Amino acid sequence: MTADRIEVQRAIRADPASIFAVLCDPQGHVAIDGSGMLMDADGDVVTAAGDSFVVHMDREALGDLPMGEYDVTVTIKTLVPEREIAWTILGTVRPPIGHVYGYRIEPTDGGSLVTSYYDWSEIAPAWREAGIFPVIAEGSLKSTLGILARTVRRGYPH
Protein backbone atom coordinates (compact mmCIF):
# COMPACT_ATOMS: atom_id res chain seq x y z
CA MET A 1 0.00 0.00 0.00
CA THR A 2 1.15 3.52 -0.82
CA ALA A 3 -0.25 6.92 0.10
CA ASP A 4 -2.36 6.80 -3.09
CA ARG A 5 -3.15 3.11 -3.46
CA ILE A 6 -4.55 0.18 -1.49
CA GLU A 7 -3.88 -3.43 -2.48
CA VAL A 8 -5.19 -6.55 -0.77
CA GLN A 9 -4.74 -10.20 -1.75
CA ARG A 10 -6.54 -13.45 -1.17
CA ALA A 11 -6.00 -17.01 -2.34
CA ILE A 12 -9.20 -18.29 -3.91
CA ARG A 13 -9.83 -21.95 -4.69
CA ALA A 14 -11.08 -21.32 -8.21
CA ASP A 15 -9.50 -21.09 -11.64
CA PRO A 16 -8.80 -17.65 -13.13
CA ALA A 17 -11.55 -18.09 -15.79
CA SER A 18 -14.27 -18.55 -13.15
CA ILE A 19 -13.11 -15.51 -11.20
CA PHE A 20 -12.74 -13.39 -14.32
CA ALA A 21 -16.28 -14.26 -15.43
CA VAL A 22 -17.66 -12.67 -12.25
CA LEU A 23 -15.47 -9.58 -12.65
CA CYS A 24 -16.53 -9.00 -16.28
CA ASP A 25 -20.25 -9.18 -15.49
CA PRO A 26 -21.89 -5.94 -14.28
CA GLN A 27 -24.14 -8.02 -11.99
CA GLY A 28 -21.01 -9.76 -10.68
CA HIS A 29 -19.79 -6.43 -9.33
CA VAL A 30 -23.06 -6.02 -7.45
CA ALA A 31 -22.97 -9.62 -6.20
CA ILE A 32 -19.50 -9.31 -4.62
CA ASP A 33 -19.54 -5.70 -3.39
CA GLY A 34 -18.26 -5.48 0.17
CA SER A 35 -18.95 -1.76 0.59
CA GLY A 36 -22.72 -2.09 0.46
CA MET A 37 -23.04 0.75 -2.06
CA LEU A 38 -23.71 -1.20 -5.29
CA MET A 39 -27.45 -1.83 -5.61
CA ASP A 40 -27.87 -3.01 -9.22
CA ALA A 41 -26.28 -2.69 -12.66
CA ASP A 42 -27.29 -2.41 -16.30
CA GLY A 43 -25.16 -3.43 -19.23
CA ASP A 44 -23.52 -6.31 -21.00
CA VAL A 45 -20.56 -8.42 -19.94
CA VAL A 46 -17.40 -6.47 -20.74
CA THR A 47 -14.88 -7.93 -23.18
CA ALA A 48 -12.44 -5.11 -23.93
CA ALA A 49 -10.97 -1.86 -22.68
CA GLY A 50 -13.41 0.94 -23.45
CA ASP A 51 -16.52 -1.14 -22.67
CA SER A 52 -18.83 0.35 -20.05
CA PHE A 53 -21.90 -0.32 -17.93
CA VAL A 54 -24.03 1.57 -15.42
CA VAL A 55 -24.11 0.82 -11.69
CA HIS A 56 -26.92 2.05 -9.47
CA MET A 57 -25.40 3.18 -6.19
CA ASP A 58 -26.51 4.15 -2.70
CA ARG A 59 -23.89 6.04 -0.71
CA GLU A 60 -25.84 5.66 2.54
CA ALA A 61 -24.00 2.38 3.22
CA LEU A 62 -20.84 4.38 3.93
CA GLY A 63 -22.64 6.82 6.20
CA ASP A 64 -20.36 9.67 5.17
CA LEU A 65 -22.19 11.83 2.61
CA PRO A 66 -25.95 12.19 2.19
CA MET A 67 -25.92 11.44 -1.56
CA GLY A 68 -28.76 8.94 -1.57
CA GLU A 69 -29.21 6.90 -4.74
CA TYR A 70 -27.32 7.79 -7.92
CA ASP A 71 -25.81 6.17 -10.99
CA VAL A 72 -22.22 5.85 -12.14
CA THR A 73 -20.79 4.70 -15.44
CA VAL A 74 -18.00 2.17 -15.12
CA THR A 75 -15.56 2.30 -18.04
CA ILE A 76 -13.04 -0.49 -18.44
CA LYS A 77 -9.50 0.84 -18.57
CA THR A 78 -7.56 -2.46 -18.63
CA LEU A 79 -8.78 -5.91 -19.64
CA VAL A 80 -6.39 -8.82 -20.00
CA PRO A 81 -8.48 -12.00 -20.14
CA GLU A 82 -8.23 -14.08 -16.97
CA ARG A 83 -5.39 -11.86 -15.64
CA GLU A 84 -6.46 -8.26 -15.00
CA ILE A 85 -9.42 -5.93 -15.16
CA ALA A 86 -9.46 -2.28 -14.07
CA TRP A 87 -11.96 0.55 -14.46
CA THR A 88 -12.67 4.19 -13.82
CA ILE A 89 -15.96 5.70 -12.73
CA LEU A 90 -17.89 8.67 -14.05
CA GLY A 91 -20.57 9.77 -11.64
CA THR A 92 -22.54 12.89 -10.94
CA VAL A 93 -19.59 15.00 -9.79
CA ARG A 94 -17.38 17.12 -12.03
CA PRO A 95 -14.57 17.17 -12.76
CA PRO A 96 -14.40 13.36 -13.03
CA ILE A 97 -12.59 12.02 -10.00
CA GLY A 98 -10.14 9.74 -11.85
CA HIS A 99 -9.73 6.93 -9.33
CA VAL A 100 -9.20 3.36 -10.56
CA TYR A 101 -10.38 0.03 -9.18
CA GLY A 102 -9.09 -3.30 -10.39
CA TYR A 103 -8.16 -6.92 -9.91
CA ARG A 104 -5.12 -8.96 -10.89
CA ILE A 105 -5.42 -12.75 -11.01
CA GLU A 106 -2.45 -15.10 -10.82
CA PRO A 107 -2.96 -18.83 -11.30
CA THR A 108 -1.66 -21.03 -8.48
CA ASP A 109 -1.56 -24.77 -7.87
CA GLY A 110 -4.60 -24.53 -5.62
CA GLY A 111 -6.57 -21.98 -7.66
CA SER A 112 -5.79 -18.29 -7.95
CA LEU A 113 -4.16 -15.46 -6.06
CA VAL A 114 -6.40 -12.42 -6.49
CA THR A 115 -5.23 -8.87 -5.82
CA SER A 116 -7.82 -6.15 -5.47
CA TYR A 117 -6.55 -2.61 -5.85
CA TYR A 118 -7.88 0.91 -5.48
CA ASP A 119 -5.68 3.69 -6.88
CA TRP A 120 -6.29 7.40 -6.60
CA SER A 121 -2.79 8.55 -7.63
CA GLU A 122 -4.13 10.31 -10.74
CA ILE A 123 -7.23 11.97 -9.31
CA ALA A 124 -8.15 15.47 -10.41
CA PRO A 125 -6.41 18.18 -8.33
CA ALA A 126 -9.72 19.46 -6.96
CA TRP A 127 -10.43 16.05 -5.46
CA ARG A 128 -6.94 15.69 -4.01
CA GLU A 129 -7.36 19.05 -2.28
CA ALA A 130 -10.71 17.90 -0.84
CA GLY A 131 -8.86 15.29 1.26
CA ILE A 132 -11.56 12.65 0.95
CA PHE A 133 -9.42 9.72 -0.21
CA PRO A 134 -9.53 6.85 0.18
CA VAL A 135 -13.30 6.72 -0.21
CA ILE A 136 -13.36 2.93 0.14
CA ALA A 137 -11.56 1.44 3.13
CA GLU A 138 -9.11 -1.44 2.94
CA GLY A 139 -11.59 -3.55 4.89
CA SER A 140 -14.18 -3.16 2.12
CA LEU A 141 -11.69 -4.47 -0.43
CA LYS A 142 -10.92 -7.43 1.82
CA SER A 143 -14.63 -8.11 2.30
CA THR A 144 -15.18 -8.03 -1.45
CA LEU A 145 -12.45 -10.65 -1.96
CA GLY A 146 -14.11 -12.85 0.65
CA ILE A 147 -17.46 -12.52 -1.06
CA LEU A 148 -15.81 -13.22 -4.42
CA ALA A 149 -14.31 -16.43 -3.01
CA ARG A 150 -17.71 -17.52 -1.70
CA THR A 151 -19.45 -16.56 -4.94
CA VAL A 152 -17.18 -18.60 -7.22
CA ARG A 153 -17.15 -21.52 -4.78
CA ARG A 154 -20.95 -21.69 -4.82
CA GLY A 155 -21.08 -21.39 -8.61
CA TYR A 156 -21.72 -17.98 -10.08
CA PRO A 157 -24.53 -18.06 -12.67
CA HIS A 158 -23.24 -16.89 -16.03
Image (spheres, rainbow, N blue to C red):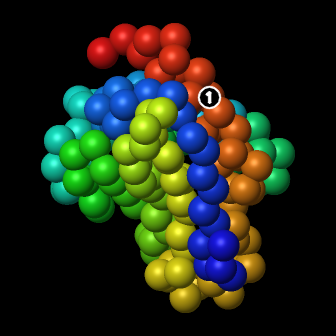
The quarter of the picture where the N terminus appears is: bottom right
Q: Where is residue 35 in the image (x, y as percent from the top left)?
A: 68, 40
Q: Quadrant of residue 3?
A: bottom right
Q: In this view, does 154 lie to the left or right of 144?
A: left
Classify 131 as above or below 105. Answer: below
Percent coordinates x, y for residue 121 in the rendering = 53, 81
Nearer to the camera, 10 or 21 = 10
Taking the spot 53% from the left edge, 34% from the top edge, the residue there is 12
Residue denoted by label 1:
147
Seen at 54% across and 60% down, the residue is 117
Q: Which residue lies furthest to the right in this view?
A: 63
Q: What residue type is labelled 1?
A: Ile
Which quarter of the image is occupied by the C terminus? top left
Does the rendering let one see residue 100? yes
Q: Residue at x 63, y 66 (%)?
A: 6
Residue in front for this viewpoint, 27 or 2: 2
Circle 1 residues within 10 Å: few <14, some 14–19, many ≥20: some
Residue located at (69% from left, 67% from top): 134
